[in-house]
Image: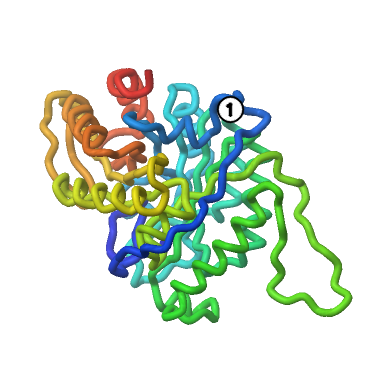
Amino acid sequence: MPGASVAPGMFVEGSDTIGVEPTPDALRVMTASDNIPASSSIADAVFAQGKLSIGITLPITGEDQGVVDFGEQIALAQLADRLGFRALWVRDVPLNSIDYPDPVGHLDPWVLLGALASNTERIALISGAIVLTLRHPLHVAKGAISVDALSRGRFILGVGSGDRPQEYAAFGRDAEERRDLYKRHWQTLAAAVSLPSRVIPDALPEGAPEFYLLPRPHASIPMLAVGSGGQSVDWIARHSLGWMTYHREPQAQRGRYSMWRAAVDRAAFGAFRAFGVAMRLDLVEDADAPATDISLGYRTGRRGLATVLRDMRESGTHHVTLNIASERRPARDIIEEIAAHVLPEFHR
């Protein structure tokens, strides 16, 4: 989602300090889609206790690449689907400017998600993340229900708040109100994509009809917090299936997970709530090249990547989406190498 200085293709988390909020309430219960085996929902396929799954963020671009061949992106998505990656992540970047370091011309997320739904079969589709504060929640709900129907229950709705004040101004929003706006929009959105689906109007003048959304959702669409949205971890633990954050060095990430786990115990004791990470990856041809730090991720060979992922799994991470750097090697080669040599250990 939109943010400050980051590498192309990376998630950005809100910059607010994330505190705790001690008052618990009930978390919405997800149900499995009719198109998915009864024992498992699409969220279960991506996030599972004690396991780590691997996804890919689209589009995959080279350094300073502003023009994307979206036909090639669909082909890469189909390849990832065939080879067993668990999720495809799509970002929401409403506007570009010279102050924003990502030069990529992203498609509208609903357009790209619709194309992915029509051209893949098994892989989960995740928005990472719809900027909930800059879109009306009923429009977001309509898009989410549509993608879920097109993909036959493979959609997870990741939402964030954005963090560029100038972009808020362009949409006539006050960036200082984003915390409250995020909460209000989440409530309206959750009501619309849960079962039974309910439309909460902004205003209801006398004589107004009762509204509903068509197509009607066949199951509750899982909602995932990407970044903090200015909320406490306790709020996120109560309202979201999990928390998606960006890469940090291992010690800091372990501390982040410990904070998350404590919040889950306070808000929903004994329940499973997922923890995921977006990580940049520059995979080199030398399989034995050790992992070295780059901005928001690692440069490494495939064995070093497997070691990094094992450590992340042991420290509590349930899903990693890879922001693949393709300056050195074709993205197809990187995807095929990971599928052949890394996925078998994690996707049994």
Instruction: Decide: few, some or many residues near mark 1? Use Cα within 10 Å; few <14, some 14-19, many ≥20.
Output: some
Residue 22 lies, with reference to residue 98, above or below; the image says above
In the displayed structure, 20 sits above or below 221; it is below
For the image, the number of numbered tags is 1
Q: Quadrant of residue 285?
A: top left
On screen, residue 260 versus residue 298, left or right, reads right
Q: Amino acid at mark 1?
A: Glu
Asked whether residue 102 appears in the rendered view, the answer is no
Q: Nearer the viewer, residue 347 or 57?
A: 347
In this rendering, position of residue 222 left or right of residue 293:
right
Picture residue at 36% right of the left edge, 64% below the top: 21
Q: Residue at x 47, y 60 (%)?
A: 93
Question: Toward which corner of the image does residue 154 lie, by quadrant?
Answer: top right
Looking at the image, residue 307 lies above or below residue 205: above
- Picture coordinates of residue 282, whole percent (x, y): 24, 39
* In this rendering, position of residue 291 left or right of residue 265: left
Position of 281 compared to 84: left or right?
A: left
Residue 316, how many percent across, how many down? Answer: 27, 38
Q: Quadrant of the N terminus?
A: bottom left
Give the image location of residue 165, x and y in percent: 40, 77
| x 26%, y 40%: residue | 281
Name which residue lies at 33% across and 46% down: 278
Instruction: Indicate how the structure is coloured in the image.
Output: rainbow
- Residue position for label 1: 121
Comparing 262 with 127, the one in front is 262
Residue 331 appearing in the image: yes
Measured as percent of width and height from the top left, residue 259 is found at 26, 53
